[in-house]
Amino acid sequence: MPPVEPGVQYADLEQQSETAQLGMWVFIATEVLFFGALIATYVLYRASYPAQFRIAGHDSLILLGSINQAILVTSSLTMVLAIRAARLADRRALVRLLLATAALGFAFIGVKGYEYARDAASHSVPVIDFVFKHGYRAPAELFWTFYFIATGIHAVHLSIGIVLVLILAARAARGAFTPLYHAPLEVVGLYWSFVDCVWFFLFACIYPLGRAGI
Amino acid sequence: MDQWVPFWPTNAALSASIVDTINIGEFALIGLILLFVTGMTLVFCVRYRRGSPAPRQPLGSSSWRLEIAWTAATLAAFFVLFVFGANAYLFLYRPPPRTDLEVYIVGKQWMWKVQHPGGQREIDALHVPVDRTVRVVLASEDVIHSFFIPSFRLKHDVVPGQFETFWFRPTRTGEYKLECSEFCGVQHAHMIGTVTVMSAADYARWLSDQGVAESLSQQGAALFRSYGCSGCHDPHATVHAPLLTGLYGRVVQLQDGRAVRADERYIRDCILTPLNQIVAGYPPVMPSFAGQMSEEDLIRIVAYIKSLSAGSSS
Amino acid sequence: MSATALELPASYLTEENTIGSWLLTRDHKRIAMMFFCSITFFFFIGGIAATLIRLHLLSPAGAFLQPETYNRLFTMHGIVMVWFFLIPSIPATLGNFLLPLMIGARDLAFPRLNLFSWYLFNTSGLLAVYFLFVGGVDTGWTFYTPYSTLFSNGHVIAAAVAVFINGFSTIATALNFVVTTHKLRAPGMTWFRLPLFVWAIYATSIIMLLATPVLAMTLALIALERLMGIGVFDPQLGGDPLLFQHMFWFYSHPAVYIMVLPAMGVVSEIITCFARRPVFGYRGMCYALITIAVIGFFVWGHHMFTSGISLLSAVVFSMMTFIVAVPSAIKVFNWTVTLHNARIQFDAPMLYALGFIGLFTLGGLTGLVLGTLSSDVHLQDTYFVVAHFHFIMVGGTVSAYFGGLHYWWSKITGRHYPEIWGRFAAILMFVGFNLTFLPQFILGYLGMPRRYYTYSTDLQTWNVLSSAGASILAVAYLLPLFYLTWSLIWGRKADDNPWHATGLEWLTASPPPAHNFLRTPRVTEGPYRYDPRDGSYVSQDGVFHA
């Protein structure tokens, strides 16, 4: 492939790469506020209804949540290793690691889908099919509302990430990335790690409730 | 103030005097600041217009002392305004030192429904005696409204899902506008009424002229029976339920460890969402009356429970 | 300094003139112009709504509108003016055009993202206007629950979705501006050599980035609540209607700083140039901008003093409100003192800037009244609030926007507007504006609530005065439409630096070529090296001009 030229507003590729990464960091800041607003709502309602949230949270499927956590952390590892492969000009490893990242992302979605199905079977879907036998129902429904909205928005973000990673894999297979130019990998890698981090926070909100004295 | 300034609104309550006094001081201060800023701007524009003979000095020495000085002065002036305002607000919005009269008001699209403790009812009107402290309990049946009496310089939002309370003390007889000041739908502009402040004697006469048989708490007692509350809360009931005599104003220990004061809000919450505030030592068996009771029925029952002082039977 | 006889590249306007070259452009200047056209369109939609409202309020019983229509009109006016005019106005037009020029860059960091922002903006705007016409929304631009989620019969979800999409346009632009300012400054352009307009746009962009996502989540939640009946804000389902207000105002208070900070940046540029002296207290001005941006995030509760929030939180929010007013006051003092020891010229941009000082000061001072807790109990939700925010947003931001358009018109289009008409429109706007909104302070103190389609007869005089002022204001807004358009064809041609200003944008041709500078400038001077004794100046590349 011919050497990549920086955009006309850039002095060199390095400035362009740094700028792209700063752009992704700034975007991540906005996403922190976006998820943060939702999590703040959750925290406020949890503080208002501690007992009912604890009971409702106990019904969440912590095993599936934990499996997903492990999947996502591993996918961040493969993503970082992919960037390393680009730096070392190892095209085959780069493509494989990107595909592995995407595959792990798909696995997450799959487990999440199964978890949603199990949640529906146990009548935990607010408004549509919700049964709560342990007292004042409204706060429990609010807990599950938060669960579906938060994990749903997270899944949308993850899906966008999967698409981006697949696009990068296709470009990498055609030799687009070199040790000198692999800024798109860095930028998507940042995004991917962010989506991973969000899951840490969602996990902490959803699964430990009602267990181990929390 | 309303006597000398042609378009100053009528001052008809203690709150209006307080608010007006602070506002006059504030308007004077901001008037001075505005005069100062615009005055200086105009003077400089004339004096330093291009072509004027005024001498221009070379620029340059540091000005941070001046900047610190006027920053500090501004902060100090603003702090004074803040303190006066906060102090007055706390006086206006905290419970009054003593209450002479309580009134219950329900806002709904698009009218104000007023209930006096003697059972007298009004719509879009409120009769109150002059020079008495009136405490108002507000409820909304649907959306957020705001109960606003311009001549008293007072308003309070009426939020569905909870009782709000505030108080006023009228100081002048007459008729004053009552308006809704939170957009609540098509006829928001028609959710208006009249507050009539009367002498004590006229007010007493007005109350008896309404020809009401039952007081609010008596109506509440009837509802207490018809909704089945007495089935559990009667001292002779078989179900173990908290007794309600002397409840109002007392501190209640809840099962989850919280200790709450039993005010109107608490009582309302107990009726609508009982499982959220189970009293310590009692089983979680009270049914919820959410969706069954209108705000007016809730007010009647709350009024009844408030009337149960220790020593009388329910 | 005029263009030389060298073989210069074509300007960004004439370079390639197919529709496709505009709709697919990456040039920040073309995108700025496209934004200019879009927001002018939305300004007129919002203005028509205002015209109908003021005509209707000539009569106490309401002149000709049905209550339902009136309610939809004030909602449309608010939504369109806030999100589709005021918030993008200075940043997306002047900011887009000038930011790269002022820092010596050849474009923004992410040109395609810039274009995408314009498409998002138009999509959201057309969606909003469509639904506002077809059936309408009547909740007010504030969408308070539970009216908006459970009771309103309008297209609330569509309006929420439109504003949600618009939020992404804002975020994209702000991201571009922040990254560009950090990474693409020309050699020698340190932070404290940046013009105040750049600082203002930067501070605005920080607010946009941090506040808009919260609005997005809030709108998503009310849309879901309305669509599916979840109970986040429904008291009967355990929700809290006041939580909506907290979340909404957490965005919407910083949003008002999004609307005013760029205006402050424009005013600083104009005053220093037409007073022919450096702005007083440059660093203080920079710090004031950043301080306003930060503290502005901690005052949102002052919109809720009468909503039933805890007394302690009310007291804290009031205190923070007074604190945030201090840096604004500092800026006003600094602008005023900039006129001392100056050499002032009263061209149209300067008239707009001087008008800004007076109107913004009065607007800000009445904000102090509203921030005073006891006063707010009386004045909240009355016309006093309406007057206050119009003084800042219209008297302030719109004045500055028009001032900036006039100031940079020659740079943007290569033509001069007719100066007499410019000055006349500025003065007419000032007069019309005051006549429109000063009576509204009185109406508010007399207790006329907001959002009322009818009012008591004793308030008619003030309403009629206000509507009369509005008719003058309308003329003052239409005049520039005509003479600025006229100038595009018959205006006197402009050279590089007709105002003899010091910024980097004046080093390049009027209008600039596609990539701004033939060679990246080297900056050796701070901004505003004007000498009032003789009007000479040193531009930021170090060249002295007599």
Image (spheres, coloured by chain):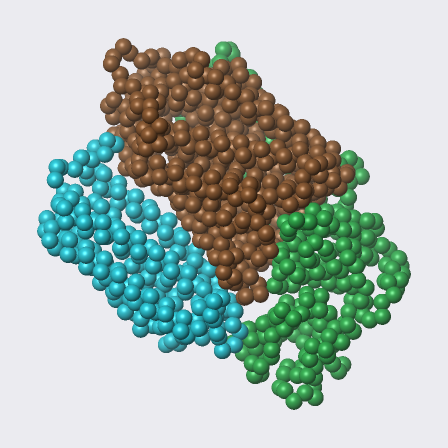
Chain colours: A cyan, B green, C brown
Q: Is residue C291 visible?
A: no
Q: Please state, as top left, top right, bottom left or bottom right, where the C terminus of chain C lies in the image.
A: top left
Residue A152's x, y, as percent? 38, 60
Q: How many marks do you count on the picture?
A: 0
Residue C296's x, y, as percent? 48, 45
Q: Is residue A92 visible?
A: yes
In the image, residue C63 above or below residue C469: below
Q: Quadrant of residue B94?
A: bottom right
Q: Please state, as top left, top right, bottom left or bottom right, where the N terminus of chain C lies in the image.
A: top left
Q: Quadrant of residue B284?
A: bottom right
In the image, residue C238 above or below residue A36: below
| Image point (33%, 69%), residue name | A114
| Image point (21%, 44%), residue name | A183
The residue nearer to you, when weighing C244 against B44, is: C244
Residue C211's x, y, as percent? 44, 47
Q: Residue furthest front?
A: C134
The residue nearer to you, when weighing B291 against B165, is: B291
| Image point (43%, 55%), residue name | A37
Task: Give the side of residue C336 with respect to residue A105, left or right.
Answer: right
In the image, residue B258 above or below residue B143: below
| Image point (35%, 32%), residue name | C23
Residue C128's x, y, as percent? 50, 42
Task: Give the side of residue B313 with respect to residue C72, left or right.
Answer: right
Q: Quadrant of residue B39?
A: top right
The residue nearer to you, when weighing B23 against C211, is: C211
